[in-house]
Each structure stands twice: as structure tokens, then as C-alpha cells.
Amino acid sequence: MQNELLREFGLPDLGIARADLALVRPSALPSILTETMFLMVPEQENALRDPGVHERIARAHLRGIEAFLRGRAGER
């Protein structure tokens, strides 16, 4: 997911963190929480007002999910 978002937007790589967050904890299925852009960065806040940016985020998420599933299929 991270690679696809970085590739799509060219934003700085702030890394990946793992945490025991309630949002992703109770599921038996894989889960992920992404923060593509931040409202406290004016340029990013402005970008997030654009529906086209929402579409690009969604497509990057889709590519990330597809890559994850391809990797899982290769494990079998």
C-alpha cells in the first residue's frame, strides 16, 4: 500500500508504523490504516478538496490490495 501511495503522489516516505489500534485490532482479516495526506499541510489540504485526488488515492489503494493478494497467491 505504502509503495503505491508514494508512487502515485511523490510524497515523502514517512515510513510505516505498527500499533495496536482498536480500528484494526478486532478483525481476523488483514487490515490497514493509511494516512495519505495531512490537513495540517496547506498544499495537501488543498489537494484533498479535489475529487480527482480522492480517485487517485482509491486507485493507489486498489493497486496495493491487488499486490498484497498476488503476494499471498504466490505463497501457496
Image (cartoon, rainbow, N blue to C red):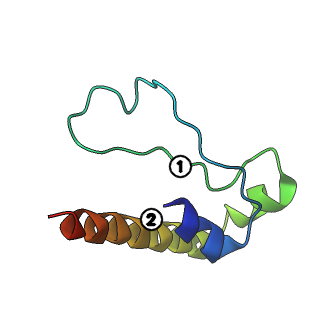
User: Which residue is depicted at the point 36% across and 70% down?
Assistant: 67
Image-quadrant location for residue 42:
bottom right
How many circles with numbers are drawn on the protein? 2
* Picture layout, residue 20 above or below residue 73: above
Residue lying furthest left: 76
Label 1: state its secondary structure.
loop
Determine which quarter of the picture holds residue 37.
bottom right
For label 2, the crowd category at 10 Å Cα-Cα, with few meaning under 14, some 14 to 19 and many 20 or more, is: some
Q: Tell me: 62 left or right of 15.
A: left
Give percent across and percent down for residue 40: 81, 44
Mark identifier at residue 61: 2
The reply to whether callout 2 and callout 1 are in contact (CB within 8 Å) is: yes
Q: x, y (%) of residue 11?
A: 74, 65
Going by the numbered disc 2, the residue's amino acid type is His
- x, y percent for residue 38: 72, 49
Left or right, residue 22 beside residue 51: left
Residue that appears at 40% across and 30% down: 23
Give the residue pinned by disc 1.
Answer: 34
Viewer-closest of 1 and 70? 70
